[in-house]
């Protein structure tokens, strides 16, 4: 029998049993819907997160922090300015360094209003060398390093002070009896206001308060550097330079390489997607079992029809082909509907997730202070578009048709082997 004729008979039989065909296809549709929606959401989320990380962690920037040892435990508890000078002058490929001291602080605005911020001491010349045009002044300029009561304010939509204004800042300083701290107030004169610059790695320019490095050493009564930002000439050499820095510290300091973070994120998303797709595939197995059961029932119902076909000369392979074709068509139709519905579900979830993240970041900001809200904000203010790749579509079609045919194989073989005489006598 010709393929065209077999397809025609398969479609006729499926239309004749519309309800049963629809219920059988429903299991396939649900399985494909789950697979496609998870894959599209995962792909869209990965693209968005990679973009967010690449934006906040420039590939030509390395971050050196205290710590190290096995699994990040142990190591140095602080860095020094001399170490940053060594990195700048002795490690090939380093363009500039930016050591800074940083700790939480509160700006008193009056009328019992406050603003949580990060008080950062750094060299403004080095800041310009590392970040270039990214950090520019909207008003005023860098403070005089010889004047210890001047500061620069990060970008705020509603500025809390203008150039020349005084602001009072409260912060904690460690006293000799560790681990006790003492609150200290200090009044700064604003010398400049930054343009909006966002966040780069661990450095948050907006909503921050910046003072000269020497001033922070005096105020904090400490020489301990919190972090060293290292700008490199060639991002492709990031790992090599990072290894040299680790060797210098004898693995007692952490060196964060943005490209490695991006690769790690991709690996984690791939593992998560495989895990979730494994769970979603269970729905496809359930659909396959449903096809097996319904096909067995169909063989029993159509026993006389099979007997007539064999009596008229139909061969076993023709009967087998007809049943398998019906199963393949079920898988094909189920895949089409499942892909469309799956992408639709992923698109709806893509619109809802940013709203959920926004609420989460606001809640965390309320619990952990303004800076918590700011840092979470960069990952909550995203719009996620699901990514449906050609590979996913091909896999969905292949998997759907294969599952349908494999689970229909036993009933189809049973139908093909029916004895025509017994089939015609079947009631």
Image (spheres, rainbow, N blue to C red):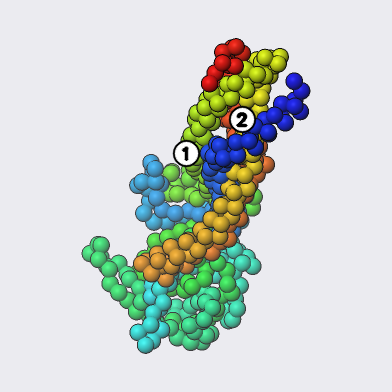
Instruction: Specify the label residue 279 is tagged with.
Output: 1
Residues at marks 2 and 1, CA–CA distance in whole angstroms: 23 Å
Circle 2 Cα neighbour tier, 10 Å, few/some/many (<14 / 14–19 / ≥20):
many
Quarter the N terminus occupies: top right
Q: Position of residue 202 (x, y in %)?
A: 48, 60
Residue at 47% x, 61% y: name it.
356
Label 1: which secondary element:
helix
Residue at 61% x, 30% y: name it.
327
Mark sitting earlier along the chain (2/1): 1
Q: Position of residue 397 (x, y in %)?
A: 64, 36
Residue highlighted by disc 2: 327
Q: Is 418 placed above or below 286 here? A: above
Q: Is 406 placed above or below 367 here? A: above
- Asked which quadrant contains residue 157, the reply is bottom right
Q: In this image, 362 relative to 12: left or right?
A: left
Q: In this image, 66 relative to 281: left or right?
A: left
Q: Camera-side residue: 73 or 92?
A: 73
Q: In this image, 6 relative to 18: left or right?
A: right
Q: Camera-side residue: 245 or 324?
A: 324
């Amino acid at each position: 029998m010709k393929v065209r004729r077999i397809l025609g008979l398969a479609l006729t039989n499926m239309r004749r049993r519309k309800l049963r065909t629809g219920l059988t296809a429903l299991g396939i549709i649900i399985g494909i819907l789950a697979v496609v929606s998870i894959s599209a959401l995962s792909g869209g989320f990965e693209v968005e997160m990679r973009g967010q990380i690449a934006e906040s962690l420039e590939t030509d920037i390395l971050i050196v922090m205290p710590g190290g040892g096995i699994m990040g435990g142990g190591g140095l508890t602080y860095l020094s300015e001399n170490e940053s000078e060594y990195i700048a002058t002795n490690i090939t490929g380093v363009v500039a360094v930016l050591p800074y001291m940083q700790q939480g602080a509160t700006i008193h605005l009056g009328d019992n209003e406050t603003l949580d911020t990060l008080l950062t001491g750094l060299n403004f010349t080095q800041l310009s060398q590392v970040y270039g045009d990214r950090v520019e002044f909207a008003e005023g300029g860098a403070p005089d390093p010889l004047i210890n009561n001047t500061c620069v304010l990060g970008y705020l939509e509603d500025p809390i002070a203008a150039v020349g204004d005084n602001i009072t800042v409260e912060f904690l300083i460690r006293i000799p009896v560790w681990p006790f701290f003492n609150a200290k107030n200090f009044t700064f004169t604003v010398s400049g206001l930054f343009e909006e610059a966002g966040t780069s790695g661990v450095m948050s320019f907006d909503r921050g308060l910046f003072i000269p490095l020497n001033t922070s050493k005096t105020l904090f009564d400490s020489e301990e550097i919190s972090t060293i930002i290292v700008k490199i000439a060639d991002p492709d050499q990031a790992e090599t330079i990072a290894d040299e820095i680790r060797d210098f510290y004898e693995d007692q300091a952490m060196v964060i390489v943005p490209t490695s973070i991006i690769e790690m994120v991709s690996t984690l998303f791939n593992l998560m997607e495989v895990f979730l797709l494994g769970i979603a595939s269970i729905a496809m197995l359930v659909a396959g079992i449903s096809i097996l059961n319904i096909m067995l029932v169909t063989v029993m119902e159509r026993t006389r029809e099979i007997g007539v076909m064999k009596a008229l000369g139909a061969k076993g392979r023709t009967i087998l082909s007809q049943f398998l074709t019906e199963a393949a068509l079920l898988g094909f139709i189920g895949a089409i509907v499942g892909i469309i519905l799956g992408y639709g579900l992923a698109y709806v979830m893509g619109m809802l997730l940013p709203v959920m993240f926004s609420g989460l970041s606001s809640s965390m900001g309320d619990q952990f202070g303004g800076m918590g809200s700011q840092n979470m904000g960069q990952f909550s203010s995203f719009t996620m578009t699901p990514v449906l790749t050609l590979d996913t579509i091909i896999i969905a079609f292949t998997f759907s048709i294969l599952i349908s045919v494999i689970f229909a194989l036993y009933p189809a073989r049973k139908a093909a082997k029916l004895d025509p005489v017994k089939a015609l006598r079947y009631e």
